[in-house]
Amino acid sequence: MTLDLKNTFEWIGKIGTVIGTISGAYIFVGGPLPATRNYVHEQLIPVKKKLDGVNLSVLEMGTRINGSTRVALINERGALERTLAAKVDALDDAARATLQRRLNEVDNALRALTRDDDALWKSMEALK
């Protein structure tokens, strides 16, 4: 059995023509083309910018929430300090200890809010 190269090349040519014709028809009717890496990257850039904008809005909302929470905690701390400083006779030792413990919790919450707020601002700066 001998290999007829001329006949083989003719078949390869015919197959190439068929593939080319099918590909052309596929593209003509609007079939999707395989995307290149650059094309995908170009399509993702606007999406990333939109997501960064959404993330920035969420972080800004977080700073606003922290601000209002901070105001509420500062008001509570002031009320607790005034109550403890008044030395009201109606407060027994247990009530005074409870108020002092709550005052410490408020101070801890304010410190945590400050740390969270700092982290939010750093994240916002990174997105800008």
Image (cartoon, rainbow, N blue to C red):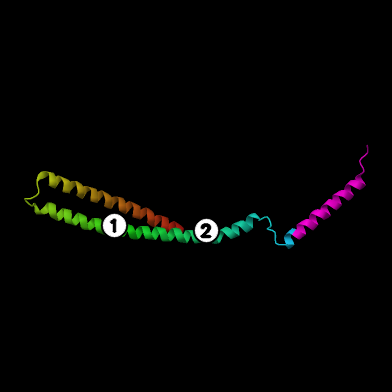
What's the residue type where badge 2 is placed?
Lys
Q: Is residue 87 left or right of residue 71?
A: left
Closer to the camera in the image, 61 or 41: 61
Q: Position of residue 53 (x, y in %)?
A: 46, 61
What's the residue type where badge 1 is placed?
Thr
Is there CB contact under 8 Å for labels 2 and 1?
no
Check the picture and name the quadrant holding the C terminus: bottom left
Considering every residue shown, the one lying at the far top of the view is 1
- Determine the image quadrant of residue 61: bottom left
Above or below: residue 127 compared with residue 8: below
- Please report the residue visible at 15 percent of the width from the left and 45 percent of the height from the top: 97
Q: How many marks?
A: 2
Secondary structure at numbered mark 1: helix
Q: Which residue bears the numbered disc 1?
A: 69
Q: Is residue 21 magenta?
A: yes
Q: Position of residue 70 (x, y in %)?
A: 28, 57
- The stretch of residues the image draws in magenta is 1-25
Q: Which residue bears the numbered disc 2?
A: 48
